[in-house]
Image (tube, rainbow, N blue to C red):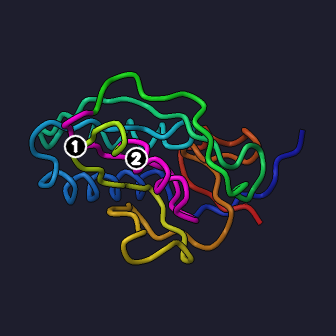
Amino acid sequence: MSHPEFEKVLSEADLMARIDDLAARLAPSLEGEWTAINILIGATPFTSDLMKALARLNVHPMLDALWLESYRDARESSGRVVVRADISRPVKGRGVLLIDDVFDTGRTLAFARQHLLSKGARKVVTCALARKPWAPEGEDNVDYHAFDAPGRFLVGYGMDDAGLYRGLPYIAALD
């Protein structure tokens, strides 16, 4: 099987530096009882490294996951968000740090925020690894992100193309 040509957008070392910087920006706002929620599957490597970076700063939120789907195997969102598997621990009265891989249309994080607020979360702070140039601004914007992504299709570090390339230790673009 031949693989497409990847153009490296962010090296593994640059990724780790940006995640450490993000953790330093996040840490002061994560006082009290917090749950970090990983949006499966794409945000898993990012969530793992962000949790380690927060732990080095003595911030230890609980960890849970929410499996949402809007892309299936396509390169564009279907426009519809579906809950494939819900969180396993209650968030009532807790702050929630909602972690996603790419902030693109904003639909996934908006859906997840409302979903968690309806379960009684006292506050939901959104965080994405990458923010696309056309992503929503203002109140619909992501609260924190590690880097501004190019307006291209990204793979690696959890992001995929029809299930492939999630294991790349860097972020690459496909055209």
What is the C-alpha distance between the residues marked 2 and 1? Answer: 13 Å
Quarter containing the N terminus: top right
Residue 18 figure quarter: bottom left
Q: Where is residue 139 drawn, in percent x and y?
A: 36, 72
Front one among 127 and 10? 127
Observer-side mark, 2 or 1, equals 1
Circle 2: residue type: Ile
Whether 98 is among the magenta residues is: yes
Q: Residues within 10 Å of mark 2 (few under 14, many from 20)?
A: many
Residue at image point 47% right, 51% down: 12
Q: Residue furthest right?
A: 1
Residue at image point 60% right, 43% down: 168
Quarter containing the C terminus: bottom right
Q: Residues within 10 Å of mark 1 (few under 14, many from 20)?
A: many
Residue at image point 72% right, 38% down: 163
Whether 145 is among the magenta residues is: no
- Label 1 sits on a secondary structure element that is strand
The magenta region covers: 92-116
Residue at image point 48% right, 66% down: 131
Circle 1: residue type: Gly
Q: Is residue 65 left or right of residue 21?
A: right
Q: Where is residue 108 drawn, in percent x and y?
A: 53, 53
Marking on residue 99: 2
Q: Give the residue number, with chain letter if any, for mark 1.
A: 95
